[in-house]
Image (cartoon, helix red, strand yellow):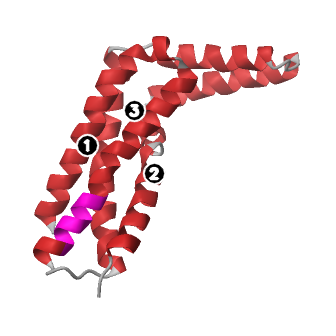
Amino acid sequence: MKKTVLVFGVLSGLVSTALMFATLPFLEKIGFDKGLIVGYTGIVLSLLFVYFGVRSYRDNKLGGKIAFGRAFGVGLLITLISCVFYVVSWQILSRNFMPDFADQYGARVISDARKAGADEASIAKTTKEMADMKKMMNDPIVGSAMVFIEPFPVGLLVTLISAGVLRKK
């Protein structure tokens, strides 16, 4: 199981990293809204390796049979490895190539609130929330945990679906 999990986890992580490095530098041209769609599409594409990893483990190591629990475990481990790659990639990109990302994002959220007609109290609250978010993102541990939360739910969903589809008794 270790080899299968490592191979497919690393492949998933490398795809995630490649897509992040290929698209994030163009975030200003893409825009935050479309960037969100592009980003989550990349996450889903990279996490397709969960399905292939579980299937490979079932077919090559277990003779074509796998219980839901075992399939879920394999998929979850692949997801965790992929998420670690995602977090490390984000930390490298954000710290070295996009150090003003939190400022840009905060300015965009505040601008959107103004355009939506928010009152000054709401804008002040949003401004404080964005400043707090920037502080959290600058802390490597808290920031990493926040970034980990992006791909992990998607990976969990892909793992559940894969385990359900691929289980065979």
For the residue carrying disc 2, how many other residues have a C-alpha within 10 Å: few (<14), some (14-19), or many (20+)? some
Q: Nearer the viewer, mark 1 or mark 3?
A: 1
The residue stretch that appears in magenta:
51-58
Mark 1 residue crowding within 10 angstroms, few (<14) / some (14–19) / many (20+): many
Label placed on residue 140: 3
Q: CA distance from mark 1 to mark 2?
A: 14 Å
Task: Name the amino acid type tagged 3.
Answer: Pro
Camera sees residue 5: yes
Query: SS class of the residue under badge 2?
Result: helix
Q: Residue at x 27, y 53 (%)?
A: 49
- Please tell me whether the stretch drawn in magenta is mainly helix, strand or loop: helix
Q: Which SS class for mark 1?
A: helix
Question: Which residue was labeled with disc 1?
Answer: 13
Name the residue rendered at 20%, 74% in the picture.
58
For the point 85% across and 20% down, the residue is 118
User: Residue 162 vs residue 146: left or right?
Assistant: left
Residue labelled with disc 2: 154
Please provide percent x and percent y for residue 149. Answer: 47, 45
Picture quadrant of residue 114: top right
User: Quadrant location of the C terminus?
Assistant: bottom left
Label 3's element?
helix
The residues bearing labels 1 and 3 have C-alpha atoms spaced at a distance of 20 Å
Q: Nearer the viewer, mark 2 or mark 3?
A: 2
In the figure, is residue 4 to the left or right of 150? Answer: left
State whether residue 134 appears in this view.
Answer: no
Which of disc 3 and disc 2 is earlier in sequence?
3
**Label 2, label 3: how many angstroms apart (C-alpha)?**
23 Å
Please state which amino acid type lies under the numbered disc 2: Val
